[in-house]
Image (cartoon, rainbow, N blue to C red):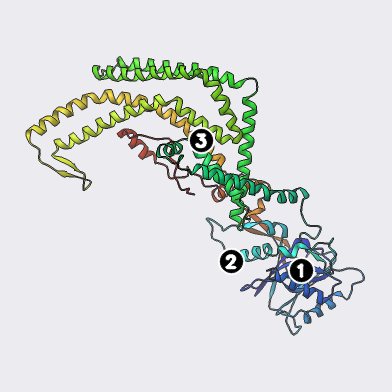
């Protein structure tokens, strides 16, 4: 039977003493956590182990560690005799020889006899990396079941032994240990001061957010028109989304699980980057009077777009591409849309004196983050292209009525009808008058279809351009909101923090010594980091397929760019 000993690299050159760690239950494996240096008093060692066990850490003396040193020739026999003071089922007696990398290992039973049947394998690991890493299950692989069940126990044993690492060589304690923090615990005065100051800041932020949410949930703002408008405005949706983010980050309760901690950290870093980019945008916009230049170009651009639409409608009212249209319907639709363009131009010129002031205040919203500025850009685009949206709706409704009218009259010719109750097509007998009227209506709709289809096609293309622009803006906002920046930073700069598994390489294979392997951590793949730690957002919902989208466009059904669910889905 193979005995696996997980040995920390930081203890390779430790002074002679006792090995403390934990036997993995159900496995013939031991995890060494630290070395207690000689000289020591066995009673104090037992007291220290009981103190550590009272904090929830399962700790025991695994055996002895002998490091050759001048003046300590009889240390190995002395440490072997300590097995009677710390009785164990198996006593590991490790020793290192001068000039050799590998260790010698003897496994003693309770009666001080050697156990020659066990083959020993040393697995060296970096205690700091294993302590700080989070092991994830392996995907798309066929792992060894024994290794797969053993690795989480090894990682869990090291991670749960945090109270053991509170002592370092600078502590005035009768027990001296060697472990990954024995040279001095990692810490920073600035970090500790920030931790102390974060509590009142979090409480104040939570109180302000509570007032804000209570104001937003008041009856005045929950009237049906207000609720409908706020659900369609990207700015309101982003504001509610960031409010929920701040409530999560400013919660005074400490994160208890790894996923909860990573969610908080990702949201905080995302919010910090968002605000930083927003402040950079504000500093750029308010330099060299860029707001005034943008306001001066906005109204002429709107006039130019309106002029181009007028020319397009004049082209459609003639003989577009040599097509012969229905003259009467063509003139009615063209004049109807031209009237809307004139109304829109009048509205733009009425608002032109206030455009610069509106843009000045809108630019200040970028202080709340780049996502707010992008959401306002999407809403402003929707307002500036409202006439195009109206044209699209008029054309789509008219085309949809024509298509459904033709399909219904086509069923009339075949002696069929649509059963509304059963949601199916049934047979039906029609009299002569019904067939005559149906034929007349079918002929009229069929000859009007090219005119309505052409207007619908042109305004649908214009609408799709606007929808694509808003879609790019929404994707940018969703990317900033949901991309796990903190997790990606860990993956790039401290890849061991997010582990998917381990790999072993031969470290030493000397005659007379057991096999020594080095356990290296396999970092999580970048794609899986994004998939695992991506923050769920309101826009994470199943999109329409291309086939369904083409079907909607062919039948004249309306396509809306904004669809936000009330519940978030990963």
Residue 124 seen from this side: yes
Question: At 78% from the left edge and 50% from the top edge, which residue is drawn?
Answer: 189
Q: Secondary structure at mark 2?
A: helix
Badge number at residue 149: 2
**Position of 288 relative to 86 (above/below):** above
Residue 100, quarter of picture: bottom right
Q: Secondary structure at mark 3?
A: helix
Badge number at residue 511: 1
Residue 309, quarter of picture: top left
Question: At 54% from the left edge and 40% from the top edge, which residue is drawn?
Answer: 479
Compare residues 294 and 41 and report the one nearer the observer: 294
Disc 3 or disc 2, which is closer to the eye? 3
Residue furthest to the right in view is: 71
Q: Position of residue 224 (x, y in %)?
A: 40, 39
Badge number at residue 235: 3
Q: Position of residue 382 (x, y in %)?
A: 45, 29
Q: Earlier in the sequence, mark 3 or mark 2?
A: 2
Q: Position of residue 509 (x, y in %)?
A: 74, 64
Q: Is residue 375 left or right of residue 327?
A: right
> What separation in Å lies between label 3 and label 1 (alpha carbons)?
71 Å
Q: Is residue 279 left or right of residue 384?
A: right
- Label 3–label 1 contact, CB within 8 A: no
């Amino acid at each position: 039977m193979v005995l696996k000993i997980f040995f920390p690299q930081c203890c390779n050159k430790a002074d002679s003493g006792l090995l403390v760690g934990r036997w993995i239950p159900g496995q013939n494996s031991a995890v060494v956590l630290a070395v207690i240096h000689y000289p020591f008093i066995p009673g104090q060692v037992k007291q220290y182990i009981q103190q550590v066990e009272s904090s929830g850490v399962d700790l025991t003396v695994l055996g002895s560690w002998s490091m050759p040193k001048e003046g300590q020739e009889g240390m190995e026999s002395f440490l072997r005799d300590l097995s009677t003071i710390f009785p164990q089922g198996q006593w590991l007696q490790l020793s290192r020889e001068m000039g050799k990398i590998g260790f010698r290992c003897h496994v003693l039973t309770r009666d001080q006899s050697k156990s020659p049947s066990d083959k020993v394998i040393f697995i060296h690991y970096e205690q700091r990396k294993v302590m700080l890493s989070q092991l994830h299950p392996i995907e798309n692989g066929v792992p060894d079941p024994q290794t797969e069940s053993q690795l989480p126990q090894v990682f869990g044993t090291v991670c749960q032994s945090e109270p053991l690492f509170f002592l370092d060589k600078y502590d005035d304690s009768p027990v001296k240990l060697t472990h990954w923090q024995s040279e001095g615990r990692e810490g920073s005065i600035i970090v500790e001061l920030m931790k102390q100051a974060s509590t009142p800041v979090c409480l104040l932020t939570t109180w302000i957010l509570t007032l804000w949410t209570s104001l937003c949930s008041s009856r005045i703002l929950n009237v049906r028109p207000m609720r409908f408008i706020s659900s369609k405005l990207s700015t309101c949706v982003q504001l509610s989304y960031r409010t929920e983010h701040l409530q999560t980050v400013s919660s005074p309760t400490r994160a208890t699980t790894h996923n909860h901690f990573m969610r908080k950290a990702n949201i905080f870093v995302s919010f910090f980057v968002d605000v930083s980019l927003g402040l950079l945008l504000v500093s750029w916009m308010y330099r060299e009077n860029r707001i005034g230049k943008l306001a001066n170009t906005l109204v002429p651009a709107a006039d130019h777009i309106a002029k181009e639409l007028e020319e397009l409608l004049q082209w459609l009212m003639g003989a577009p591409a040599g097509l012969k249209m229905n003259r009467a319907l063509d003139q009615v639709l063209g004049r109807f849309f031209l009237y809307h363009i004139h109304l829109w131009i009048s509205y733009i010129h009425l608002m032109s004196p206030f455009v610069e002031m509106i843009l000045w205040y809108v630019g200040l919203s970028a202080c709340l983050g780049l996502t707010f500025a992008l959401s306002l850009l999407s809403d402003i685009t929707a307002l500036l292209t409202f006439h195009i949206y109206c044209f699209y709706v008029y054309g789509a409704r008219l085309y949809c009525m024509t298509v459904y009218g033709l399909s219904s009259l086509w069923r009339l010719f075949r002696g069929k009808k649509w059963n509304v109750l059963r949601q199916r097509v049934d047979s039906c007998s029609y009299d002569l008058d019904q067939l005559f009227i149906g034929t007349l209506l079918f002929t009229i709709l069929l000859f009007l279809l090219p005119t309505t289809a052409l207007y619908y096609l042109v305004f649908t293309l214009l609408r799709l351009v606007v929808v694509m622009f808003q879609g790019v803006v929404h994707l940018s906002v969703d990317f900033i909101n949901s991309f796990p920046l903190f997790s990606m930073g860990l993956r790039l700069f401290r890849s061991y923090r997010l582990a998917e598994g381990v790999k072993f390489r031969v470290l030493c294979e000397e005659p007379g010594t057991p096999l020594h392997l080095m356990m290296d951590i396999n970092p999580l793949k970048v794609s899986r980091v994004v998939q695992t730690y991506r923050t769920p957002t309101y826009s994470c919902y199943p999109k329409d397929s291309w086939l369904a989208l083409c079907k909607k466009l062919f039948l004249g059904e309306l396509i809306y760019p904004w669809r936000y669910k009330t519940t978030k889905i990963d």
